[in-house]
């Protein structure tokens, strides 16, 4: 059924107001159409270099998370936070992206290495993975809300769902 819906959605998204005629379509199926070529303005060597560096850091974070997972200290990566000491400027530039890229509850960028204040941690140079210290949001499952929060959900989810957030997830 999904392929049929895809055909319908594609046809009517192009502004059509009636069903397609079988002999008029430019391609027999939406699945036969070719992808549009991306704009040459998207070819940015600087962005490519930045993303390669971010993915190298991500590989290291994933390795540390896997160590915690193997020892049964975490079940999912969202149960951890990452602390990066003395991060390069490129990491600081993309600070808001890091917790999404690493799929963790939080990322802290600090100037000086911190002494671990949790019962467990895994470190590799300037990267430390440790347990999340906040409470788990029942909507997005990240550990991002204070345990004593008046809200049932984290601040991000509260922005999305507003007062409906008091509904039980």
Image (spheres, rainbow, N blue to C red):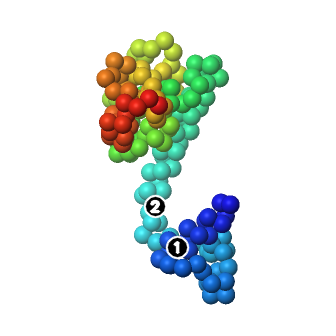
**Going 67% across and 87% down the picture, which residue do you hit?**
23
Q: CA–CA distance between discs 1 and 2?
A: 38 Å
Which of the 4 image quadrants contains residue 24? bottom right
**Going 44% across and 29% down the picture, which residue do you hit?**
168
Decide which of 24, 66 is in the foreground and name it.
24
Query: Horizontal placement of 18 versus 135: left or right?
Result: right
Query: Horizontal placement of 24 versus 141: left or right?
Result: right
Residue furthest to the top in view is: 119
Q: Quadrant of the N terminus?
A: bottom right
Report which residue position mark 2 lands on.
45
Residue 127 versus residue 32 in the image, above or below: above
Residue 49 versus residue 20 in the image, above or below: above
Which of the 4 image quadrants contains residue 145? top left
Report which residue position mark 1 lands on.
12
Residue furthest to the bottom in view is: 24
Q: Secondary structure at mark 2?
A: helix
């Amino acid at each position: 059924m999904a392929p049929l819906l895809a055909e319908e959605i594609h046809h009517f998204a192009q502004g059509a107001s009636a069903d397609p005629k079988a002999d008029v379509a430019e391609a027999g199926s939406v699945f036969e159409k070719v992808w549009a070529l991306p704009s040459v303005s998207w070819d940015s060597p600087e962005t490519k270099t930045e993303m390669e560096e971010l993915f190298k850091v991500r590989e290291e974070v994933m390795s540390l998370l896997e160590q915690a997972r193997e020892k049964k200290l975490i079940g999912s990566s969202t149960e951890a936070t990452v602390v990066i000491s003395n991060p390069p400027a490129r990491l600081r530039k993309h600070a808001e992206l890091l917790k999404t890229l690493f799929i963790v509850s939080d990322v802290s960028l600090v100037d000086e290495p911190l002494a671990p204040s949790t019962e467990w941690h895994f470190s590799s140079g300037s990267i430390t993975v440790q347990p999340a210290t906040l409470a788990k949001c029942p909507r997005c499952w990240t550990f991002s809300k204070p345990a004593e929060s008046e809200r049932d959900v984290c601040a991000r989810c509260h922005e999305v769902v507003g007062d409906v957030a008091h509904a039980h997830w």
